[in-house]
Amino acid sequence: MTSPTTFPARHTPADTSATIATSTSVVDHLDPRVWRRVNRLLVRKALSEYAHEHIVEPRLDATRPARRPRHQSYALATPDGHTVYRFEARLMALGHWAIDADSIDCLAGGVDREVDALRFMTDFKQALGLKPEQLPIYLDEICSTLYSSAYKQLNTTHGSRALIHETDFQVIETSMTEGHPAFVANNGRLGFDGADYRAYAPEAASPFQIVWLAVHRDQAAFHCVPDLSYEQLLREELGEETLARHDAQLRDQGLTPADYLVMPAHPWQWANKLSVAFAPYVAQRRIVFLGLSEDRYLAQQSIRTMFNISAPRKRYVKTSLSILNMGFMRGLSPYYMSGTPAINQWIKELLDRDEALRATGFTMLREVASMGFRNHYYEAAIETDTPYKKMFSALWRENPLPLLKEGERLMTMASLLHVDRDGEALLPALIEASGLSAKAWLQRYLRAYLTPLIHCFYTHDLVFMPHGENLILVMQGHVPVRVLMKDIAEEAAIFDTSAQLPENVRRLVMDFPDDLKTLAVFIDIFDGFFRYMNQILVEHEVCSEEDFWGEVAANIRDYQAEHPRHREKYARYDLFAPTFRQSCLNRLQMGNNTQMINLSDPAANLKIVGTLDNPLAPFAPRTVMSASGPQAKGQGPLRSTTPEVAS
């Protein structure tokens, strides 16, 4: 492995890509040895996730004895049989393929061929099912994912052992190396060039300035929570001196400041989209460039969200960013923005009133204000939903730092799946440093993370999108003590269609069939996060699969025992059911890799393929005898302090 390379950071959008793009700095991380390594890692992920979703079907290979305990040898042949991929894997709960990356080899016509992720995609393009017009886009995303993976292999300087002691939240945030654990093409970011990557990718950790624009009130709207106002927000974000300077800039152009709102934009979005696609409004002075921010920001794992490192206690800023990444053009809808603060406020008040949630410490970071600018040309021309209507919006989210108590620190929950470039996982090191047993650590984590989500599901028919990037762990002594939920308005849903809600909150109501509602737990939590967490703990010999899933089951059993009033729902939405339907994310992305889902019809977005065995089923609560006879199914389990496997 070559030594880490340090790249110069571009700090302002005025440093255009012209100079950098003609230099070698945009490719000097593409070392041949590193490139071979990241291709092998991505092929491992593709084999694992595509096999999990039954896109490909590896077969046992009896001709090759496996070298690692509990692993078996497998082979996957191309449709014409010319090329065969061979590897060792351990099949785990939820149909998860834990594959040894170093065991992968490729034979083409009986001759060894280098493991190449792009070649793998073309070898199995028929199985992937991408339309001819979509396949090149997917290959672009795969290539971009490899490009960023190579950069991270060379430039991530903080290993897992260092990160467990790190107190700077942003160091942890920018040290993550994987991205979404399920999607194979998860770092596409199509639209960025090599210079943009170093300026705006989270792992590049390059501070940059955002753009401030004045937008005419005829086409722009501002919304906020009740305890905030436009004037207060701008004073706190920009200060009186900057606001006075902006007013003077408008007056110097013969414009009336009161006719305008001041709105942030991502520097890439301004240079590449707004200055061109919104050129008529710039020419008409409906959009006026005011300058760059004095504060500097860092991109978060959610790449269009920015953290203010000049004033670390100020709010997050999130803006439209029209790059194609993981099935979406990453815009923000001005129509959705109009209801975002009200939705956040309603959910926050709901959570705050709930005594059980307060006991877990669970809370959310409100999206307290939003702005959206409407492009009338595109609206008149295009009636359907389109990324062209989502190019110019922004929101402000609460900062987690003011919520910390003495001795607490922050860590993205994505870090629990982090494996550094030397193959060391952060989670086992974190458990070891805590001084707790694996079971005790997991119990505290599950109490902070899973308990409130289960409570929201059963008590309020409310679900979130609780993957690693959407939650921030509050840590004390290397142990999670509570979690902070974020990214609320576009990714929360209420399943109770009869709920009496304010009109501006009604869009949260989703009419899902009963048999799909539990997928909010089974797929989003078990399959989407615990599946990978389980592998890390087992492979690092921290605990067994039975121990891990036993603790998950015990957490849910204990919750149900503590809240017997929902026993009918526990039976109706049984989290101990033998199987559940499998919803496949890569199939979803490859079905339409430019607009993966329709937010207005989430049930139609599910790609269901078969079922998965539920790892909680062996730990289901057993019927017990009481003075009044046997406890009926669905009447709520007795509290148990240890996992008890049903006979």
Image (spheres, rainbow, N blue to C red):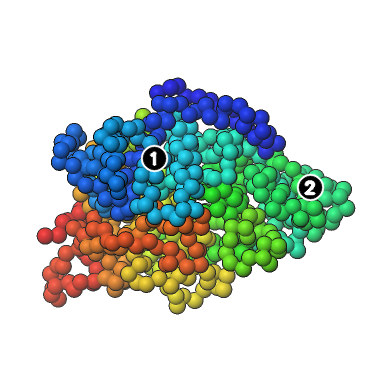
Q: Which residue is rendered at x = 49% and y = 44% of the image?
A: 140
Q: Which residue is rendered at x = 75% and y = 63% of the image?
A: 218
Left or right? Give the position of 397 relative to 426.
right
Quadrant in which residue 527 is drawn: bottom left
Can residue 639 be seen here? The reply is no
Q: Position of residue 284 (x, y in %)?
A: 81, 56
* Residue lying farthest to the top in this orientation: 3
Q: Nearer the viewer, residue 28 or 403?
A: 28
Q: Position of residue 208 (x, y in %)?
A: 63, 38
Which dot marks residue 102?
none
Which residue does the numbered mark 1 point to in the structure image?
119
Q: Nearer the viewer, residue 69 or 126?
A: 126
Crowdedness of circle 1 by 10 Å Cα count: few (<14), some, many (20+)?
few
Q: Quadrant of the N terminus?
A: top left
Which residue does the numbered mark 2 point to in the structure image?
246
Crowdedness of circle 2 by 10 Å Cα count: few (<14), some, many (20+)?
many
Amino acid tagged 1: Arg
Q: CA distance from mark 2 to mark 1?
A: 53 Å
Q: Quadrant of the C terminus?
A: bottom left
Q: Which residue is rendered at x = 38% and y = 31% of the image?
A: 37
- Which is nearer the N-term, disc 2 or disc 1? 1
Can residue 315 be seen here? The reply is yes
Q: Which residue is rendered at x = 38% and y = 65% of the image?
A: 457
Q: Position of residue 458 (x, y in %)?
A: 36, 67
Amino acid tagged 2: His
